[in-house]
Amino acid sequence: MDNLIIETYKPERDISSIRTMLRGDEYFEGKFQEDEMKFPEGIFVAYYNSVTVGFLSFSSLKGRGTETTIFVSKEYRRMGIGSKLIERAEQLLNQYEAVERSMGACIDGDRSSLQFMCKNGYHILHSSYIMVRKGENLPESHFPIRQYEDDDYLMWHGIREMAFYKMRERVGILPSYYYAPSEWERKNFLEDRNNRFVLLVNSEMAAVGVIDGSELRQVAVRPDMQSRGYGRGFVSFLVNEMMHRGEKIVKLEVVKGNPAKTMYESLGFKEKSLHHIVTKYYRPDSRLSRPPDEDIL
């Protein structure tokens, strides 16, 4: 395609045309804004006859996994532009040896995008609902909740990893996996401590969670303390905290089949969309297939 050019993103040149191109597509608007804020050097823009027609972005090129986003404007699809963007992605992902796998998402019902990703070596790992909540504050939680501290790291990490490991096993996501703790992650947690919270029960850490702008992430309750109301009280606190910070809409992602979805619905969250999470491996997966010790907590 002689009329197609793919160049590194330059905000002063590209931001206006990209916003115009994405207008009305809330999902890709959100993905672009997130990647622009966190990793702008990982964005590449496609121009056809000098018109902005698509973009490629990565969440990072330093960790084991990266979220890869490819968007082509509707009127320019089926012209090979997506294939050229994924070729650029392949070149970069093969170059960065630290990146073991790439992940993406296709909205349910978009068969052409899903077929495109499968044709290029991706497979469906699982499906997730995007849920949103609007409205008044929730009843205040009576559980002790505080911000994250550096000494919390190992227990925080263990609670999150064990809770999600067991959830993935329950809903049948394969391969299941467990991340070992790392000093890199510990440093990032400390830098982000104002957005991380822990719930205590008898002075023991029982639940952890993260506020990321308008999105609620990594909410996890210790497996041996689940089904006691701690998750409900903790989520209520986090939602109220986000609203105190000025958010009008709270979003979260929950894996299809995760029983926590019922709890979120009881707190006023509603399904907005269903996405199929796809992944492709570039190198052997170095994550642990099981926790080093099932009694780690």
Image (cartoon, rainbow, N blue to C red):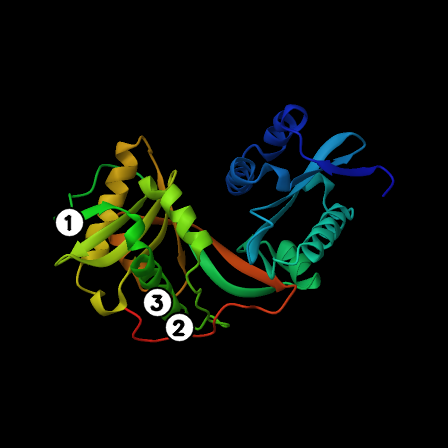
Q: Earlier in the sequence, mark 1 or mark 2?
A: 1
Q: Residue at image x 55%, y 41%?
A: 28
In this rendering, position of residue 181 left or right of residue 67: left
* Image mark for residue 162: 3
* Mark 3 neighbour class, 10 Å CA radius: few under 14, some 14 to 19, many 20 or more: many
In this rendering, position of residue 14 left or right of residue 159: right
Residues at discs 2 and 3 in contact (Cβ within 8 Å)? yes
Closer to the camera in the image, 52 or 151: 151
Task: Determine if residue 133 is in view.
Answer: no
Residue 138: give x, y in percent of width and height: 20, 42
Going by the numbered disc 2, the residue's amino acid type is Pro
Q: What element carries label 2?
A: loop
Q: Is mark 1 on a helix, strand or loop?
A: loop
Q: Residue at image x 65%, y 55%?
A: 112
Residues at discs 3 and 1 in contact (Cβ within 8 Å)? no
Q: Is mark 3 on a helix, strand or loop?
A: helix
* Mark 2 neighbour class, 10 Å CA radius: few under 14, some 14 to 19, many 20 or more: some
Marks 3 and 1, how far apart in space? 22 Å
Residue 289: give x, y in percent of width and height: 47, 74
Residue 23: give x, y in percent of width and height: 56, 32
* Image mark for residue 278: none
- Residue that carries the numbered disc 1 in the rendered image: 144
- Residue that carries the numbered disc 2 in the rendered image: 291
Q: Is residue 55 above or below residue 154?
A: above
